[in-house]
Amino acid sequence: MTRNAASEADTAVAALREMIAAGRRCVVFTGAGISTESGIPDFRSPGGIWSRYQPVEFQDFLRSEEMRRESWRRKFATHGMVAEAEPSRGHRAVAELVRRGKVASVITQNIDGLHQRSGVPEDRVIELHGNTTYARCLECGERHELAPIRDAFMADETLPACRVCDGLVKAATISFGQQMPEDEMRRAEEETLACDLFLAVGSSLVVYPAAGFPALAKQTGARLAILNREPTELDSLADLVLNREIGPTLGAAVGVE
Ligand code: NAD
């Protein structure tokens, strides 16, 4: 790093540190970018796994047994990468802010469960797009673990059925075309309205309705900071924009390795 680049980085970190220090009740909003340093590619990286495994839309999953098989094939092709991922420096910095009582809640678009794994209590994480590390029955909501589903599917592509009601079982993510989870959307809105600093980290802020929360925070008087490698659609609204790598920037601002 040149001396200029180093001093620019120091200034960016200091600005973020000051903003966090001034916040009384902060919300952190995360997207796929916070997990790339854990080895899980984001959606938009060229040649990334998500372009090879286009998700199955919800209506197709409901309609067709073959599409359900295809959905589980894709799920298990990428499952190891998520199952083996460890929280990144960015996740650890967010967990530390929650531990200090600075951050009231973490609203995430991610489905990898890494905020919980990094030590953020379950009830402080609001998952807008669900969680891919387990499955649920679409009829009765019963939780199903993936290991037995995977064993049966890998043996002869047996599709899972709910042990309680025989309903369709699907990874516990919100698919394209599936209704957003009501409870999570309501909690995310409440937390957004109650915060005085909204920190958006590693999201391109183009996936709605999730990307509506930063604008809502700003409208209700909170300060908005955006930390993302590249510019986002909402940069013009923000009080602070940092086009930087998440781990080194947030890690240094919070004092976490
Ligand atoms: P996105 O892929 O649209 O955006 C991620 C953003 O993070 C990009 O703008 C990218 O430039 C930036 N970024 C990546 N690595 C970074 C780093 N180390 N430092 C700084 N910036 C970095 O993701 P999104 O907006 O979160 O939305 C995509 C959807 O895909 C989400 O709804 C989510 O459900 C799903 N998704 C989830 C995961 C996951 O759970 N880990 C991974 C891929 C996609």
Image (cartoon, helix red, strand yellow):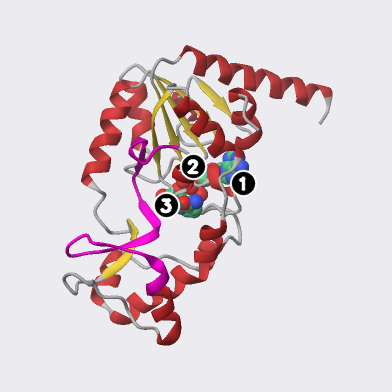
N-terminal of the pair, mark 3 or mark 2, is 3
The C terminus appears in which quarter of the rendering?
Answer: top right
Task: Let me know if residue 228 appears in the view.
Answer: no
Question: Of discs 3 and 2, which sits in the foreground?
Answer: 3
> Callout 1: few (<14), some (14-19), or many (20+) C-alpha neighbours within 10 Å?
some
N-terminal of the pair, mark 3 or mark 1, is 1
Question: Of discs 2 and 1, which sits in the foreground?
Answer: 1
Q: Which residue is mark 3?
A: 111
Residue extending furthest toward the top = 22
The image shows residue 165, relative to residue 35, as above or below, that is: below
Which stretch is magenta?
120-148
Mark 1 CB near ligand 1 (8 Å cut): yes
Mark 2 CB near ligand 1 (8 Å cut): yes
Residue at coordinates 63% horizontally, 22% vertically from top-left? 13
> Callout 2: few (<14), some (14-19), or many (20+) C-alpha neighbours within 10 Å?
many
Residue 64 falls in which quadrant of the image? Answer: bottom left
Cα gap from disc 3 to disc 2, whole angstroms: 16 Å
Residue at coordinates 37% horizontally, 73% vertically from top-left? 149
The image shows residue 79, relative to residue 119, as above or below, that is: below
Total count of labels: 3
Going by the numbered disc 1, the residue's amino acid type is Glu
Mark 3 CB near ligand 1 (8 Å cut): yes
Question: Could you tell me if the residues under marks 3 and 2 are in contact, i.e. CB atoms within 8 Å?
Answer: no
- Residue 163, x across and y down, in percent: 22, 72
Q: Which residue is mark 2?
A: 204
The N terminus appears in which quarter of the rendering?
Answer: top right
Question: Could you tell me if the residues under marks 2 and 1 are in contact, i.e. CB atoms within 8 Å?
Answer: no
